[in-house]
């Protein structure tokens, strides 16, 4: 597919959306993303340390040259700002305490029904670095870089057993930004907003070093970059999120923000990205997210709704439905805190007749209660 070299920034407006003006800063003192901001790349691929929370996120589906081996991968770098009111201090004890980084790397082996993952935590400085000027990350086993002002970038992820995934990722569509006036809302709180930019379809090619084998792999991937100063709005316990890449060349992003009582927050949304990166979307009153099957972790005893049906009213096509089915049930990511475990897994997308129409990644967060802390 032809690489689109000119970056276009496509925002979506909802006719029935209620605008809530965000403050300049959160009550903790972090900057809050502003509306109507036009990102400048490659600068905005880099880090934004004045904001409380940021992550770079890649997921994708890969296969070997023979087509006999199928893999899913997740690589995420989180940046969490230190307390802006805490003195920076001097000396080794305070070194790097203003920015904390987490690296999450996971690999799903669909053929052998196995899943491996690792979380590494690092402080800025010797252990981690993130450029402010472009995509240049070096964080505890995950590296990402972009040459010059181009959008093609390199990603390296390392796994616990010495395995490694090296990929070149080439966008086939312009970068997309989500939300009303360029802000993605995560609840009713005025500061509960983020800048949310995505490459929804990347051609992936590279090498997987896994279980003593070196394998050439190709496939498709998705990249998110989100900047915020708020974890979730008040009264929200977590989220269920998915990115779908359909066989017809379009993509779907959907998420429900779960309230403490289990219902969906009104700012939950579904977005459709067409073949030319045009975006349409609806909020919670126009779609349902139904749990069709669940899986209970033998490790944490947490119960995750891993098979779901999303039914929505498309703005121009009318009713549509997607069913997500995991390629492997046990894709639970266990970090250093058991209450912050989450499920992040490779899935198939099926239509109403049970025909596979694409692939997806599904994220189920907050089921252990670990998202209760608020940054804002």
Image (cartoon, grey):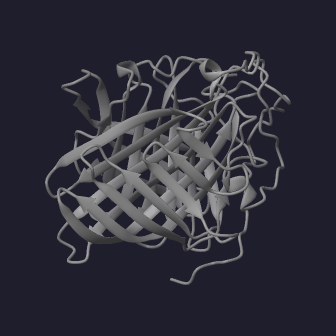
Outermost residue toward the bottom in this view: 2
Quadrant location, the C terminus: top right
Outermost residue toward the left in this view: 112
Decide which of 20, 62 is in the foreground and name it. Answer: 62
Picture residue at 78% right of the left edge, 18% below the top: 27
Decide which of 189, 215 is in the foreground and name it. Answer: 215
- Residue 75: x and y in percent read 43, 49
- Residue 129: x and y in percent read 60, 44
Q: Quadrant of residue 40?
A: bottom right
How many marks the image carries: the answer is 0
Picture residue at 52% right of the left edge, 52% below the top: 253
- Residue 324 can be seen, yes or no: no
**Is 97 situated above or below 325?**
above
- Residue 46 can be seen, yes or no: yes
Decide which of 50, 366 is in the foreground and name it. Answer: 50
- Residue 141: x and y in percent read 42, 46
Picture residue at 43% right of the left edge, 57% below the top: 156
Decide which of 33, 94 is in the foreground and name it. Answer: 94
């Amino acid at each position: 597919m032809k690489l689109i070299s000119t970056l276009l920034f496509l925002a979506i407006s909802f006719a029935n959306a209620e605008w809530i003006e965000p403050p300049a800063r959160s009550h903790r003192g972090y900057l809050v993303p502003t509306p109507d901001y036009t990102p400048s790349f490659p600068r905005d691929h880099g880090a934004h340390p004045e904001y409380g929370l940021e992550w770079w996120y890649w997921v994708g589906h890969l296969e070997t040259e023979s087509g006999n081996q199928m893999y899913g991968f997740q690589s995420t770098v989180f940046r969490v700002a230190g307390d802006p009111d805490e003195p920076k201090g001097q000396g080794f004890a305070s070194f790097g305490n203003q920015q904390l980084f987490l690296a999450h790397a996971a690999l799903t082996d669909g053929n052998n029904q196995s899943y491996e993952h690792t979380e590494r935590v690092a402080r800025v400085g010797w252990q981690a670095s993130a450029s402010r000027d472009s995509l240049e990350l070096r964080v505890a086993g995950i590296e990402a870089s972009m040459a010059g002002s181009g959008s093609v970038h390199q990603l390296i992820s390392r796994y616990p057993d010495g395995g490694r995934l090296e990929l070149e990722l080439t966008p086939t569509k312009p970068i997309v930004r989500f939300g009303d006036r360029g802000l993605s809302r995560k609840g009713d709180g005025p500061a509960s907003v983020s800048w949310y930019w995505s490459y929804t379809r990347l051609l992936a090619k590279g090498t997987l070093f896994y279980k003593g084998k070196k394998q050439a792999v190709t496939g498709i991937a998705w990249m998110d970059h989100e900047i915020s100063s708020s974890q979730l709005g008040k009264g929200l316990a977590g989220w269920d999120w998915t990115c779908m890449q359909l066989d017809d060349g379009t993509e779907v992003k959907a998420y429900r923000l779960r309230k403490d009582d289990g219902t969906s927050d009104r700012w939950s949304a579904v977005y459709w990205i067409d073949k030319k990166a045009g975006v349409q979307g609806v909020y919670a009153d126009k779609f349902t997210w139904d749990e069709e099957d669940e899986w209970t972790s033998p490790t944490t005893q947490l119960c995750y709704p891993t098979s779901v049906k999303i039914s929505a009213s498309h703005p121009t096509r009318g009713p549509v439905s997607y069913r997500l089915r995991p390629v492997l049930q046990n894709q639970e990511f266990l970090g250093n805190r058991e209450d912050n475990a989450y499920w992040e897994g490779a899935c198939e997308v099926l239509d109403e007749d049970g025909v596979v129409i694409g692939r997806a990644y599904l994220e189920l967060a907050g089921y252990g209660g670990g998202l209760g802390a608020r940054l804002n």
